[in-house]
Image (cartoon, rainbow, N blue to C red):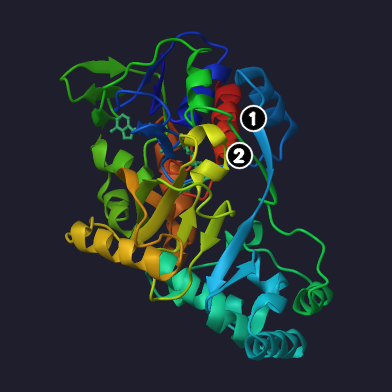
């Protein structure tokens, strides 16, 4: 029997693509979707922070066309960075024209100097920022934004993830961007899709309709690798010949009994940041025209705001807007959530997103425990060994946190598919 643990996108996709019908799929929560879920609060629909579909692969494009009951909305990104009281179009490094003139000059000059310089920095994220963008862009955006998001010194972050996620315009494009004659789009997320109604949970719900029943409310307590058995919190066991797991890798390892000391000692060094997501429904139409805005300045507690009501008009009642605030932290959960909430509200007013007299119609706080895996030298060195050990015991991790990476929804779907097809 093939057993699949976790019914997020990766687990559901594995089930969908298994030729063998002899599988069981177990999920801890009362519904499928994992991180790709949505909640409805007082007429507003909120995701676990904005989940936008970036589709690169023809296979996933076809799959979504087949799965979703109606065509998703297609959007051209409207994103900005809020600095010095101005909105700089995203990406910052290609839109220096929008900064105050002195800052434009400093960023451009620094970029050109670093471009022609021969700085040989280390193989860490901070050195890379200076080499790739120069000290001005580093100072105003790259360093404060990334320090706010990652919560650790940027020297501790390695580089495997940056190419796909940090746009790197050419010298000509940076100069054009400083002159305001930039017409080109940058980055993997210039265009995206979003379901017309129901929020992003429409996607896992559609997958669910194509597979055998998922056993909900079944939390894995332990895994015996000798007996090849999974024990659940309800005390029941199930045996497997192959185990596909989309559980976060650290939590999977914690549950394996008889784990060799050598692997056990690695668990606490798998680092990640968590996200506190405060969602608000506001009684005012179009509080912002953007899809999302980045906030690098330390005076604001959040690193990003998203506007679900700009993704689909059906995300919020007519005449209202919705807002998704993202604040990152290193685990455990901050003890002073009330303080964080108060500071969030006063910052939303001071940056002009909310007004003093705005009426808040809905409020929903969501927690994303494993939000962003930290790519560091430890991960680089030890992850292959951990995965190899698990595979040797017939346990096959998949998904964003199973493989301990930075996968998008599309990649999670593909990882489930590839695993299932490899086993079939
Ligand atoms: C803040 C944030 C924003 C994001 N935005 C985007 C975006 O805009 N676009 C995009 O493409 N991607 C985005 N992503 C990534 C996207 O969420 C993931 O790629 C995708 O949802 C991962 O699916 P998964 O199945 O791998 O993991 P998960 O969704 O985490 O699924 C794992 C499942 O395992 C279950 N589980 C855990 N422990 C147990 C247990 N002990 N027993 C049983 N079940 C258990 C969980 O409940 C969950 O259902 C974002 C991620 C974050 C954190």
- Relative vertical location of residue 320 with respect to residue 346 in this rendering, above or below: above
Residue 304 percent coordinates (x, y): 47, 60
Tell me if 4 is positioned left or right of 346 in this view: right
Q: Nearer the viewer, residue 336 or 234?
A: 336
Query: Is residue 218 at least partly visible in the picture?
Result: yes
Count the marks: how many? 2
Q: Residue drawn at (18%, 61%), measured in percent from left and top? A: 336
Kindly report which numbered mark, 1 or 2, lies closer to the viewer in this rendering.
1
Q: Nearer the viewer, residue 20 or 127?
A: 127
- At numbered mark 1, what does the secondary structure look like: helix, strand or loop? loop
**Ligand 1 is located in which of the four quadrants?**
top left
Would the CB of label 2 be found within 8 Å of ligand 1? yes
The answer to whether the residues at label 1 and label 2 have Cβ atoms under 8 Å apart is: yes
For disc 1, the marked residue is 72
Residue 329 found in image quarter: bottom left
Residue 29 percent coordinates (x, y): 30, 27
Q: Furthest residue to the front?
A: 357
Q: Residue drawn at (50%, 13%), measured in percent from left and top? A: 209
- Relative vertical location of residue 304 with respect to residue 1 in this rendering, above or below: below
Marks 1 and 2 sit apart, C-alpha to C-alpha, by 9 Å
Residue 8 percent coordinates (x, y): 44, 30
Q: Residue drawn at (34%, 25%), measured in percent from left and top? A: 27
Query: Is residue 118 at least partly visible in the picture?
Result: no
Is the residue marked by circle 2 packed among few (<14), some (14-19), or many (20+) residues within 10 Å?
many
Q: Nearer the viewer, residue 24 or 58?
A: 58
Residue 232 found in image quarter: top left
User: Between disc 1 and disc 2, whose residue precedes?
Assistant: 2
- Relative vertical location of residue 113 with respect to residue 255 in this rendering, above or below: below
For disc 2, the marked residue is 53
Q: Nearer the viewer, residue 391 or 373?
A: 373
Is the residue marked by circle 1 packed among few (<14), some (14-19), or many (20+) residues within 10 Å?
some
């Amino acid at each position: 029997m093939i057993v699949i643990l976790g019914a997020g996108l990766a687990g559901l996709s594995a089930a969908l693509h298994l030729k063998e019908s002899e599988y069981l799929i177990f999920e801890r929560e009362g519904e499928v979707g994992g991180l790709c879920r949505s909640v409805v609060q007082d007429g507003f629909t909120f995701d676990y922070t904005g989940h936008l579909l970036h589709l690169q692969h023809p296979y996933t494009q076809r799959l979504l066309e087949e799965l979703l009951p109606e065509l998703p909305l297609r959007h051209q990104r409207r994103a900005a960075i809020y600095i010095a009281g101005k909105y700089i179009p995203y990406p910052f490094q290609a839109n220096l024209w929008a900064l105050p003139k002195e800052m434009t000059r400093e960023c451009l000059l620094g970029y050109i100097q670093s471009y022609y310089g021969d700085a040989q920095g280390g193989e860490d994220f901070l050195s890379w920022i200076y080499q790739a963008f120069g000290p001005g862009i580093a100072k105003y955006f790259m360093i404060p934004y990334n320090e706010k998001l990652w919560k650790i010194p940027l020297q501790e972050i390695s580089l495997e993830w940056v190419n796909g996620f940090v746009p790197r315009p050419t010298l000509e494009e940076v100069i054009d961007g400083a002159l305001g004659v930039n017409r080109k789009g940058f980055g993997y997320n210039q265009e995206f899709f979003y379901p017309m109604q129901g929020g992003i949970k429409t996607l896992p719900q559609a997958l669910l309709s194509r597979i055998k029943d998922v056993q909900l409310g079944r939390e894995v307590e332990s895994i015996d690798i000798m007996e090849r058995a999974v024990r659940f919190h309800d005390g029941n066991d199930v045996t497997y010949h192959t185990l596909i797991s989309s559980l976060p890798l650290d939590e999977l390892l914690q549950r394996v009994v008889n784990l060799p000391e050598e692997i056990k000692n690695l668990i606490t060094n798998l680092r990640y940041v968590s996200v506190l997501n405060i969602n608000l429904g506001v009684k005012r139409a179009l509080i912002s025209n953007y899809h999302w805005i980045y906030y690098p300045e330390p005076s604001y507690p959040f690193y990003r705001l998203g506007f679900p009501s700009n993704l689909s008009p059906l995300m919020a009642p007519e005449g209202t807007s919705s807002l998704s605030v993202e604040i990152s932290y290193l685990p455990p959960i901050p003890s002073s959530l009330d303080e964080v909430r108060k500071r969030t509200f006063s910052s939303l007013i001071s940056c002009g997103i909310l007004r003093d007299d705005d009426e808040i119609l809905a409020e929903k706080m969501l927690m994303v425990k494993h939000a962003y895996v930290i790519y560091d030298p430890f991960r680089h060195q030890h992850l292959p060994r951990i995965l190899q050990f698990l595979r040797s015991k017939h346990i096959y991790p998949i998904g964003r946190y199973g493989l301990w990476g930075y996968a998008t929804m599309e990649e999670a779907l593909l990882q489930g598919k590839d695993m299932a097809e490899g086993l079939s």
